[in-house]
Image: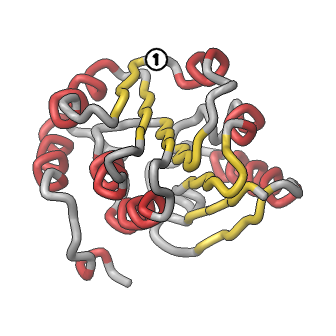
Amino acid sequence: MRQENITDIPKIYPEIQRKSEEIGFSMPSDLLIGSLLKTLISSKPGAQVLELGTGIGLSLSWMIEGMDTNAHLTTVDNDPELIAIAKHYFGHDERLTIVCDDGAAWLKVNRDVKFDLVFADAWPGKYSEIETVLEMINPGGFYVIDDMTAQPNWPEGHDKNVDKLVRYLEDRTDFSLTKMNWSTGIIIAVKK
């Protein structure tokens, strides 16, 4: 499926994309991962959702669209400029908590909080603090990561980090894992 075939794009998405280009934000999520996140969250009425790596809010716009009125989403990023932009677009939504903090520090303080879906789109929760974040997922809950296939903005040697992470997830027996050669390379794990 090509991205241009996606028709249910959130209304705010083009405005956030325009803002992304205006400030030179070079790590936007693509439409396919956004659509997938919306669908997965829709499967969990009253979902408790965590996004690690708010970025400028492109994925966030999709996740909010998938949430029902009883759901809650916490999104964490350490960049004050990006958090200010996310608050501008989404700060009015009472189902959302936007946190400006180091992801690793936030995970350590909140390690006892449980979630039905975690989208780890930052180093913490993906390449560090992985054990902590996986323990925070409820049985039947989703752990979703993207950028598992080589990306043009990867630093030298990052492929080794990806390989190590994939092997770690494959070795866990408490999650069912699907690796998808789709979008930017997706892994979806469900806690048994």
Mark 1: amino acid: Asp
Q: Secondary structure at mark 1?
A: loop
Q: Position of residue 55 (x, y in %)?
A: 35, 37
Does any portion of residue 48 appear in the rendered image? yes
Q: Position of residue 189 (x, y in %)?
A: 68, 59
Does any portion of residue 28 appear in the rendered image? no
- Eyeballing the image, is 179 above or below 113? below
| Quarter of the figure with the N terminus | bottom left
Residue that mark 1 sits on: 101
Depth check, front residue: 63 or 181: 63
Are there few (<14), some (14-19), or many (20+) residues within 10 Å of tag 1? some
Q: Quadrant of residue 71?
A: top left
Residue visible at 23% across and 23% down? Answer: 84
Q: Is residue 113 left or right of residue 31?
A: right
Count of all numbered marks drawn on residues in the image: 1
Q: Is residue 55 left or right of residue 192?
A: left
Q: Position of residue 87 (x, y in %)?
A: 23, 27
- Eyeballing the image, is 160 above or below 103? below
Q: Is residue 131 left or right of residue 142?
A: right
Q: Position of residue 115 (x, y in %)?
A: 59, 41
Q: Is residue 19 left or right of residue 47?
A: left
| Quarter of the figure with the C terminus | bottom right
- The image's colour scheme reads secondary structure
Q: Quadrant of residue 24?
A: top left
Residue visible at 55% across and 49% down? Answer: 117
Residue visible at 32% across and 64% down? Answer: 31
Depth check, front residue: 118 or 26: 118
Residue visible at 29% across and 55% down? Answer: 65
